Image (cartoon, rainbow, N blue to C red):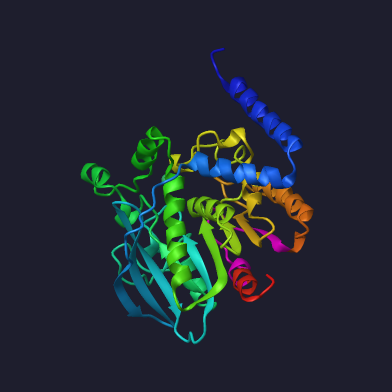
Amino acid sequence: MWRADAFLESMYNEAEKNTKDSQAAMSAEERNRYLKQTLRRLIGEFEANENHKPVLLERESCDGYIRERVELSAVPGVSFAAYILIPEDQRKPMPAAVAVHGHGYGSREIVGLKQDGSSDPDPPGIHRHFAVQLVRRGMVVIAPDVAGFGDRRLAADLARNPEAANSCHRLSTQLLMHGKTLAGLRAAETLRALDYLAERPEVQPGGIGIMGFSGGGLISFLCAALDERIRAAVLAGYPNTFKDSIMAMQHCICNYIPGILNHAELPEWIGLIAPRPLYLESGADDRIFPAAGFNSAVEQLRETYRRAGAEDRLQADLFPGAHEISGRHSYDWLSERLSSPEN
Ligand SMILES: [Zn+2]
């Protein structure tokens, strides 16, 4: 067999069969517990940094909100910065959201700043300054710097190329050699940002959601699947099947989690968020997370939510656009879901 196309196809079919057998052998509750345990193991667990105290780095008054920058740490020896956006007219505790960016230059890209930290007067790029969109709708927002982008590129990569786009490759490959994943490190840090957000006096207890775009959609779904404190999630430019997206074309290595396909396809993993409210959006012309895979994932998730008696808690929008955030309905949806006591 010179070419292994058929071999790969048969491996996919075998994994699909194993998934069906496993689904048939377990009750819904058993399957849910099994998948959550498996997901924790597959992405790799990290020792928690119990000793780090958050440090306030900046506090600025912006148009309608206060923007703080704090230093946090989830893993011993590694710290990261996060922006906190607080509505200016905040008087009582408010709903809050974790905003997770994808590939680009870091959290500045979603809070309306250029890479050097100065204000960005240009029309927003594919991230649409979405953290600002959320704070303008009355949510306290935390936007952590995701490992490997912007200020968090590795010195080893910048020494070779000061313009290096990111450190996904070096971080991913080295973590994989230790049986861990970059997705796992990013999820651990994002959950640390969630801990910090939950402790802020401006934040309404039990009113925290998450929104992530592209690679940030991966991190957001992992966090929401594994942490019930997340009451509602928006996944943008990511929901799909592995077969139609991650496995169909060349994606950044940070998207790959060894062994994940042997247990479930992506829609079932995302379904771990059920019955909590979930909004999925994707561009009809997104070439790396294609519409056919998005529609297939939505269909499977509708069935998951229907079985959970929570059909009205799942919303989807295939909007006219490419690999980008739309937000035409999802920003308001998140705000409404977090403001309503019964979701
Ligand atoms: Zn990457």
What's the residue at 51%, 77% (across, down)? Answer: 136
Given the current orientation, which residue lies at the most extreme left position?
Answer: 159
For this rendering, which residue is in front, 217 or 95? 95
Question: Which corner quadrant of the figure contains ligand 1?
Answer: top left
Q: Is residue 319 magenta?
A: yes
What's the residue at 59%, 73% (across, down)? Answer: 335
163 to the left or right of 293: left
What's the residue at 28%, 47% (across, down)? Answer: 154
> Which quadrant holds residue 30?
top right
262 to the left or right of 312: left
Q: Is residue 281 magenta?
A: no
- Screen quadrant of the N terminus: top right
For this rendering, which residue is in front, 143 or 117? 143
Q: Position of residue 153 (x, y in %)?
A: 31, 50
Q: Position of residue 328 (x, y in %)?
A: 61, 68
Q: Position of residue 146 (x, y in %)?
A: 40, 55
Q: In the rendered view, would you say 111 is above or below 177? A: below
Q: In the rendered view, would you say 78 is above or below 159? A: below
Q: Is residue 180 visible?
A: yes
Q: In the rendered view, would you say 149 is above or below 182? A: below
- Screen quadrant of the C terminus: bottom right
**Total numbered labels:** 0
Magenta span covers which residues? 313-332
79 to the left or right of 28: left
Q: Position of residue 333 (x, y in %)?
A: 64, 69
Q: Is residue 292 visible?
A: no
What's the residue at 53%, 37% (across, down)? Answer: 249
Given the current orientation, which residue lies at the most extreme top position?
Answer: 1
